[in-house]
Image (tube, coloured by chain):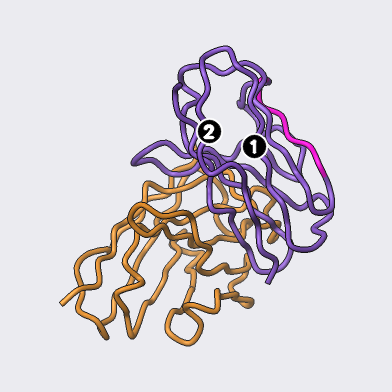
Amino acid sequence: EVQLLESGGGLVQPGGSLRLSCAASGFTFDTYAMTWVRQAPGEGLEWVSSISISGDNTFYADSVKGRFTISRDNSKSTLYLQMNSLRAEDTAVYYCAKDKEGVRADYFDSWGQGTLVIVSS
Amino acid sequence: DIQMTQSPSTLSASVGDRVTITCRASQSISIWLAWYQQKPGKAPKLLIYKASNLESGVPSRFSGSGSGTEFTLTISSLQPEDFATYYCQQHLGPLVFGQGTRLEIK
């Protein structure tokens, strides 16, 4: 059974940093592209960032480009999202998601339970 | 970026009804569209990919159609567990989700 377990969320002040992790199990992690999607309270889904299987290629939404960095450690089956210069509008539940096809097909058949990030003073 | 517009934003229906949700793209995305279901406090669940492919384990009452700029998700006979929010997502270029359609009990 595929499992994705996010961690690292919490309360952080504007301008601060946070690192999210997503521990994967139940599938061969190093054969699937991975993605972060977020959802602000009461709002819809927003794509944040994606990473290729090897980690060589990364992609970002304009809203986070230059502030967030996605990475992965295939030896640990773990996906990361380093978030710097956080803003109030980054407040959201952050989900990690597994690409259904392996290479970056960009639709997601498995999702974590989410981790809540609150940016507030 | 390609924008996605879902309609309606809210849909009231009864168990047994046939319902259709529409998603329109601001430019052609061929068949590169997925549909998700999300229940409160839960992660989204993939229902349909590449416009009309039913995800494994998803009941056959769900179907997707369309290509280019107009797409539909149809539920042929609503069941109590289908009341949720539905999102379309284009997967051509920078990913974009529709704003969601809340399906509520009439």
Task: Indicate the colour of chain A.
Answer: orange
Q: Position of residue B31 (x, y in %)?
A: 81, 49
Q: In the image, B81: left or right of B53?
A: left
Q: Provide the chain ID for the residue under circle 1.
A: B
Circle 1 residue: B21
In the image, the chain rendered in purple is B
Vertical relation: A48 (above or below) B22? below
Q: Is residue B68 magenta?
A: no
Q: Quadrant of residue A21?
A: bottom left
Residues beneath discs 1 and 2 located on the same chain: yes
Instruction: Give the residue drawn at x 49%, y 43%.
Output: B44
Q: In the image, A73: left or right of B27?
A: left
* CB within 8 Å, label 1 to label 2: yes
Q: Position of residue A113 (x, y in %)?
A: 37, 46
Instruction: Give the residue drawn at x 53%, y 47%.
Output: B100
Q: What is the crowding at mark 2: few (fewer than 14 residues within 10 Å), some, or many (at least 20)? A: some
In which quadrant will I find the N terminus of chain B?
bottom right
Q: Position of residue B105 (x, y in %)?
A: 44, 23
Instruction: Give the residue drawn at x 83%, y 47%.
Output: B67
User: In the rendered structure, which disc, 1 or 2, sits on the residue that comes first in sequence?
Assistant: 2
* Magenta-tinted stretch: B61-66
For the residue pair A11 and B19, the one nearer the viewer reads as B19
Circle 2 residue: B11
Examine the residues drawn in magenta and state their main secondary structure: strand
